[in-house]
Amino acid sequence: MGLDGMAGGTAGVAAASVNWDDDDNAITAVERGAAALDASAGGIGGCPFAPAATGNIATEDLLYLLDRSAVRTGVSATALAPATDLLASTIGKPVPGLFAKAGPFPPSVEASSGGGV
């Protein structure tokens, strides 16, 4: 049986936190064997049960984090960034995701290996 994780970005702690009791923790989920993580392009979304929720962790931010942590996904955050820009343009407002704005730095494992994340 596989383990999946959901990394909400409301408090800005979706990428990593100290212990497994924090449910918004992508890195710990992967370290504990998660085979899938939920995210959303640009970090858009929300939750009907938490009206002020900002949405999931941005897919491209999660991909960049996993890349920098040497976790191979087969998906490139760099390749996804233009789609995130298109999404922001389409909905007419900035999206919470950061990777599309900042880009990769320092050069990613992706760039140095010549392949996808």
Image (cartoon, helix red, strand yellow):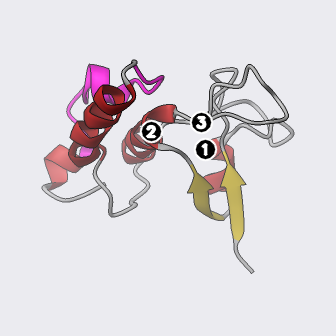
Residue furthest out toward the bottom: 1
- Percent of width and height locating residue 46: 67, 33
- Percent of width and height locating residue 47: 74, 36
Does 44 lie within the magenta span?
A: no
Q: Which residue is mark 2?
A: 65
Q: Give the secondary structure at mark 3.
A: loop
Q: For residue 83, what is the image quadrant?
A: top left
Q: What's the distance in space between the residues labelled 2 and 3, CA to CA?
A: 20 Å
Q: Which residue is mark 3?
A: 45
Query: Which mark is in front, 1 or 3?
Result: 3
Which region shows up in magenta?
94-109
Does 104 lie within the magenta span?
A: yes
Is residue 32 visible to the viewer in this orientation of the structure? no
Q: Are marks 1 and 2 in contact (CB under 8 Å)?
A: yes
Q: Is residue 73 left or right of residue 45?
A: left
Measuring 48% from the left and 36% from the top, which residue is drawn there? 58
Q: Amino acid at mark 3?
A: Gly
